[in-house]
Image (spheres, helix red, strand yellow):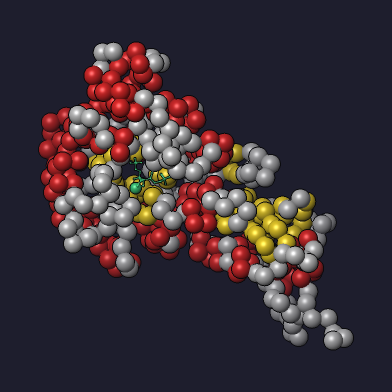
Amino acid sequence: MSEKIEWYHEFIDKNYKLKKDDIKVLFYYEPAEGITNEDAIGRIASESSSGTWTTLTELPKLLPKVKAYAYEYDNNYVKIAYPIIDFEKGSVPGLASAICGNIFGMKALKNLRIIDAELPMEYIKGFKGPKYGIDVIKKIFKRKSGPVTSVVPKPKIGYTAEEHAKKVGYAVWTGGIDCCKDDENLTSQSFNKFETRVKFLAKYRDKAMKETGEVKDAFINVTSPNLKEFEKRVKLVHNYGFKYFMIDMVVSGFTTVGTAVELAYDYNMAIHGHRAMHSMFTRNPKHGMTMLFLAKLMRLIGVDQIHTGTGVGKLEGSAESIMAMEKMLMNQEVDKIENVRTSQKWGKIKPVLPFSSGGLHPGILPQVFDIYGTTDIGLQVGGGTLGHPDGAEAGAKAVMQAIEAYKQKISLEEYAEKHRELKRALEKWGSLKPI
Ligand code: CAP
Ligand code: MG
């Protein structure tokens, strides 16, 4: 073989002059055995932009303008700059098919992970972002401060639509909780059909609102087998007067999330974003993408509330990674954290309400607020409400009492002396960190 057959190194340029509108992606990478750093990063830049495995005989004139370049690399981290014209305006599926695409399957790479990407304002401008974001607190619940509270019926599935709405929804609403949330694996099963559930939830929501004088809502799971059905379900939830719907963002896919945002703007609704399946590609620290980057894509598209973890509950996710993600979601500008987060400016894109959930109960809520550094977040407490020794309504009251104690800077133990529901919750769980 005398002719040159591959050109991967042509996608590396340590002297590359960054342009204002470049998309800059930070990857962690490990070359496979026998592959040099340059062979690895050249492939990442090339195969995610305009290259292929071999030299080509004819090249378009535009090629120099669409090539991505690896411009900085050190200790398994590489930064790659992509010209903005490589991507369709306002399309996360378009972006993901490139930077989250074929490169993750290349034999020359043992591992590859997107840590974060700094998106230029010109790219950000192509997106709507959330309609409400953290403004749900003021605009939907008519309060000055958070948290927004919710409870998922447990067991996850098994309740009929009416039991779901009455035994759980009504009980926790009257106990002080804002929203009844569907679990991720409840969609429209034979024993709890979507339409029936919406109808019953609306009936008991109205009753609870009348009795409490408070705003009550639900995160009803509209995750559907296809987009036609998805639109129907969102419309139904809207017609029954709910201000929210819930979408399982990852299983539904970026296109569905984009459709959800269009519908949410049409109907003036907020989107609760569940993230089931994210751990399949966010958990391995060497491969996939970070939850932070997934959350960034969802803010860009326009999800109002996103699950971000607890740091102390039953699911994986360190306090440090949650803090880095929370700031990215809630601020209009963040600085970089070496190999954890890139800097980012958000322009007019509204901040997202982070939602903490997974193994929470009254006894560890103060720790969650300490990690987040604020009570202006969302909380979901399923088992930790419905496992209360005195039932669902008492469980809801215990959650609200724990929140109140924290806000008043009183220890839970002291507050529990005069609040029986909290006392009973602490007797059962103490400050247990479930695993
Ligand atoms: C929590 C939950 C949520 C998880 C999702 C569950 O129930 O309903 O789906 O929190 O994880 O099914 O486990 P509990 P994450 O309150 O009873 O634990 O929030 O990390 O995305
Ligand atoms: Mg769940």
**Picture coordinates of residue 28, whole percent (x, y):** 67, 53
Give the camera-side residue of 34 and 236: 34
Q: Using the image, determine if residue 46 lies above or below residue 241.
A: below
- Is 361 on the left or on the right of 79, as rendered? left
**Picture coordinates of residue 7, whole percent (x, y):** 78, 74
Q: Quadrant of the N terminus?
A: bottom right
Q: Quadrant of the C terminus?
A: top left
Give the camera-side residue of 47 and 120: 47
Which residue is located at x 78 percent, y 60 percent?
37
Whether residue 349 appears in this view of the structure is yes
Which residue is located at x 44 percent, y 56 percent?
277
- Is 10 on the left or on the right of 156, as rendered? right
Whether residue 139 appears in this view of the structure is no
Which residue is located at x 25 percent, y 31 percent?
388
Which residue is located at x 16 percent, y 52 percent?
160
Q: Quadrant of ligand 1?
A: top left
Give the image quarter of residue 56. Answer: bottom right
Give the image quarter of residue 339. Answer: top right
**Picture coordinates of residue 280, whole percent (x, y):** 49, 57
Label count reads 0
Give the camera-side residue of 283 and 297: 283
Q: Using the image, determine if residue 397 lies above or below residue 253.
A: above
